[in-house]
Amino acid sequence: MIQRLFRAAFAAALLTAVFGTAGAQAADKVGPDACKKCHTAEHEVWEGTPHFSSFKEIHKDKKGKEIVKAVGDKRMKKSDTCMLCHYTVIDGKAEAGPSCESCHGAAKEWIDIHNDKKNPNSIQDAIGKGMIHSSMIYDIAANCMSCHGLANPNLPGDTAATMLENEHPLNPNFELVEYSQGVVRHRFYPPDVKTNQEMTDAQKSVYYLVGQAAALVSATEAISKTDNAKYVEAQNQRIAKAKEVLGGIPEAAALLGAPTAENGRAFGEAIKGKDFTAQVGSQLPTKYK
């Protein structure tokens, strides 16, 4: 099963490499209401997050308006730059804030397959069409890092520099566990699908390491976008932290030697189900966003 998921994950990764992340494949998104039909509890969690509320708020922000103007656009909800991360875009129109497909991939090609209860291979088949399953930790983390690191593959370097110089946030300390286990946590898994389950420390240790792997790849790819000093410094901070954390993990050797998405994904698979609390337990966050 794991090998099949990995092969399908690699296929999905190829789609991501071609089309980009987060705001990309906008024409192929179906929107959060389509997911709500089956994932009601997860949708309710999303409605309590800044990702949800930002749709009605963020475009009103004074600083946000200044950034939009600086990149040459008039309205945030019609800005191709802002749409990369801040919105779920359907048929060219911003319809919601960051939502299900921002992390799990544009669903038009796979949602019917995913919903086919008569197909015993529905998950694997949907992954083959681009779904980023919850087991694909690296790919989900990569989408987080893409936006929170101001590193979307479709974001030009000069635009990123302009945004940063106009005080657009770039948090080099963004950490996967701290953010994924806070208000956005939606872990409704069998056998208790009604409970939003908390992770064990062992699970958090894997997420922590995979998050650092995704940050390393994201920053390594982004740092050549521009020679803007602020941007380069932030990406170097991300790289340095990731190398510090991953340096003591033998499974990360190939990734450290060549920080690519393929190696990041392989690293995630190699450590899945293991316990690294002895190595990173003291670094795990105790409070969440």
Image: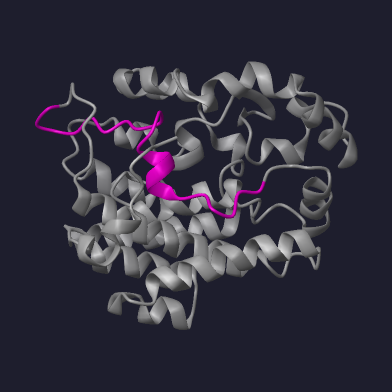
Residue 104 seen by the camera: no
Front-lying residue, 208 or 262: 208
Q: Is residue 60 above or below residue 167?
A: above
Q: Is residue 156 above or below residue 121?
A: below
Q: Residue at 35%, 61% (x, y): give it.
A: 209
Residues in magenta, as a range: 170-192
Q: Is residue 36 above or below residue 7?
A: above
Residue 209 placement, left or right of 68: left
Front-lying residue, 170 or 111: 170
Q: Residue at 43%, 61% (x, y): give it.
A: 212
Counting from the top left corner in percent of width and height, residue 272 is at 23, 60
Q: Is residue 182 magenta?
A: yes
Q: Quadrant of residue 232?
A: bottom right
Residue 181 placement, left or right of 54: left
Residue 125 placement, left or right of 160: left
Front-lying residue, 190 or 204: 204
Q: Is residue 240 magenta?
A: no
Q: Is residue 73 above or below residue 17?
A: above
Q: Residue at 72%, 37% (x, y): give it.
A: 82
Counting from the top left corner in percent of width and height, residue 175 is at 46, 50
Task: Please state, as top left, top right, bottom left or bottom right, where the C terminus lies in the image.
Answer: top left
Counting from the top left corner in percent of width and height, residue 16 is at 52, 55
